[in-house]
Image (cartoon, rainbow, N blue to C red):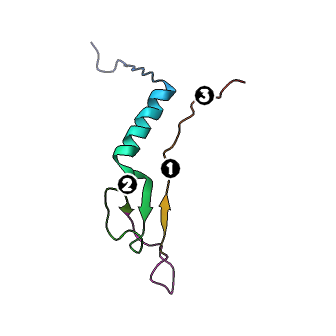
Amino acid sequence: MSLTEGWAVFVSAHESALNDLVTALTTARPHLLSYGSPAFTPVSTRFDTAMASIPFPGTGGIDWHVRFTTPHLDLYKQED
């Protein structure tokens, strides 16, 4: 058997299964959906991820915080 032979792997997943996976992941790890600078999030916790302030000349940096909702994957256009 040659080491240059090709191999292929095919995977199939239903759209609702992927959405269930994303929902379970973001429910178990809510810090993946919430980020903030030290003024809003001094340390990373189970609920928030701390990141650096946005550097801006003449200031100590712009403080910020953003929180996302659980994403919903829509892989195929729905037919009317």
| Whole-percent x, y for residue 22 in the image | 43, 38
- Left-right relation of 80 to 35: right
Q: What residue sits 34% from the left and 71% below the top?
A: 42
Label 1: how many Cα within 10 Å (few below 14, some 14–19, many 20+): few
Extreme residue in the top direction: 1
| Whole-percent x, y for residue 56 in the image | 51, 79
Please give the range of residues in magenta.
Answer: 50-62
Label 3: how many Cα within 10 Å (few below 14, some 14–19, many 20+): few
Q: Quadrant of residue 8?
A: top left
Q: CA distance from mark 1 to mark 2?
A: 11 Å
Camera-nearest label, 1 or 3:
1
8 falls in the magenta region = no
Kind of element beneath mark 1:
loop
61 falls in the magenta region = yes
- Left-right relation of 78 to 59: right
Q: What residue sits 43% from the left and 66% below the top?
A: 36
Classify 72 as above or below 5.
below
User: Please, what is the three-letter code of the amino acid marked with disc 3?
Assistant: Tyr
Q: How many marks?
A: 3
Marking on residue 11: none
Marking on residue 69: 1
Label 2: how many Cα within 10 Å (few below 14, some 14–19, many 20+): some
Marking on residue 31: 2
User: Please, what is the three-letter code of the amino acid marked with disc 1?
Assistant: Thr
Classify 75 as above or below 35.
above
Q: What residue sits 38% from the left and 51% below the top?
A: 30
Mark 1 or mark 3, earlier in chain: 1
Marking on residue 76: 3
